[in-house]
Amino acid sequence: MALNIALVGYGKMGREIEACAQFCGHQIVLRVGREGLASHDLNSVDVAIEFTQPDAAFGNVQTLLRAGIPTVCGTTGWFDRIPELDTGRTPLVYASNFSLGVNIAFQVNRYMAKLMAPHADYIARIEEIHHTAKKDAPSGTAITMAEGILAENTLLKGWELEPGASAESLPITAIRKDSVPGTHTVTYDSSMDQISLTHVAHSRAGFALGAVLAAERIQTLPAGSHTFTSLLFPLAE
C-alpha cells in the first residue's frame, strides 16, 4: 500500500529517505526543514519519518503523536525522554540505527558478549567513527552495542567515553572524520589474541531503507513505543 509520508528533517538523510520511499512507491507529501512543524498541515499524512537533531526530536515526535500520526524516529541522543511521550493512542518506532546490517550486528554482538562473559582475560572495548557533522558522542549505535555487552557481563559497571574510562567500565572511543557514514567495532583483546566484530556503512542508503521499512510496518503496530529491533526480530527482545 502506498503511503503519504512526512519527512521531518530534510537534510542529507531526509533526501536519502525521500529517494528510497519514492522508489518503493510511496509519496512524500510534506518536507519539514528548520522551520519546524508548527506551520504545517498534517491532515494528509499517513506516517512521519523524523531525522533531525537531539534538541528538536522530542518536541517533533510529541507533536506528531498528539496529532495521531504514526512516527518513525532515527534521531539519537534523546531516547531517555521516550517515557515522557504521549504514546497511548499512536505507535512510535525508534532506533539508534535503522540499517538492517547494524541490527543484525546488534544480535551477533549480544550473543558474542554472552560467550565472552566467562573469560575475564579478554578486555572488551568499542570504537565508533562518524562524519564531523554528527553531534552526539558516542553514537547511539555504540551505546546500543554497549548495552548489549553490559547485559551479559556483570563485571562491567557501565560504559564511559575514552580517554578516562575506569577499569570497571566498558570504554568507548568516538572518532570524527570527514565523510564517514558510520563504522562500529567491538573488540575483545587478550595477551593471546583478539576478536573483533565490525560493521562499516558505505552510504546512508541502508539507514534510509530501514526507515522506510519501519514506516511500512508501523501501520500494523499497536499504540506505544517500539524498537526497530523488535520489528525485525520479535523473539530477540
Image (spheres, rainbow, N blue to C red):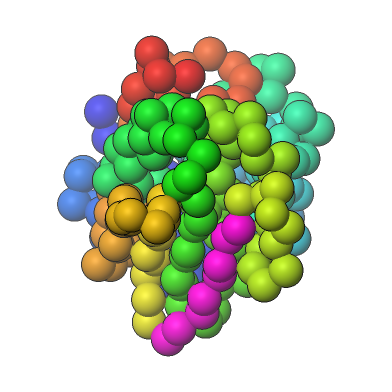
- Image quadrant in which you'd find residue 172: bottom right
- Residue 205, horizontal then vertical, whole percent: 27, 59
Instruction: Give whichever of 205, 192 is nearer the camera.
Output: 192
Which residue occupies 60% across, 58% down?
171
- Whether residue 187 sits left or right of residue 156 in the image: it is left
Which residue occupies 50% across, 51% down?
123
**Does the magenta segment cover residue 6?**
no
- Residue 122, horizontal then vertical, whole percent: 45, 47
- Image quadrant in which you'd find residue 160: bottom right
- Segment tinted magenta in the rendering: 171-178
Residue that lies at the very extreme toward the bottom in this rendered image: 178
State the quadrant of the N terminus: top left
Residue that lies at the very extreme toward the front in this rendered image: 191
| 126 lies above or below 213 | below
**Does the magenta segment cover residue 176?**
yes
Which residue occupies 46% across, 77% down?
131
On the question of residue 211 being in view, the answer is no
On the question of residue 201 being in view, the answer is yes
Instruction: Give whichever of 68, 50 is nearer the camera.
Output: 50
- Whether residue 88 sits left or right of residue 193 in the image: it is right
Which residue occupies 29% across, 62% down?
200
- Residue 216, horizontal then vertical, whole percent: 34, 31
| 115 lies above or below 177 | above
Instruction: Give whichever of 214, 175 is nearer the camera.
Output: 175
- Residue 73, horizontal then vertical, whole percent: 54, 45
| 162 lies above or below 59 | below
Residue that lies at the very extreme toward the right in this rendered image: 84
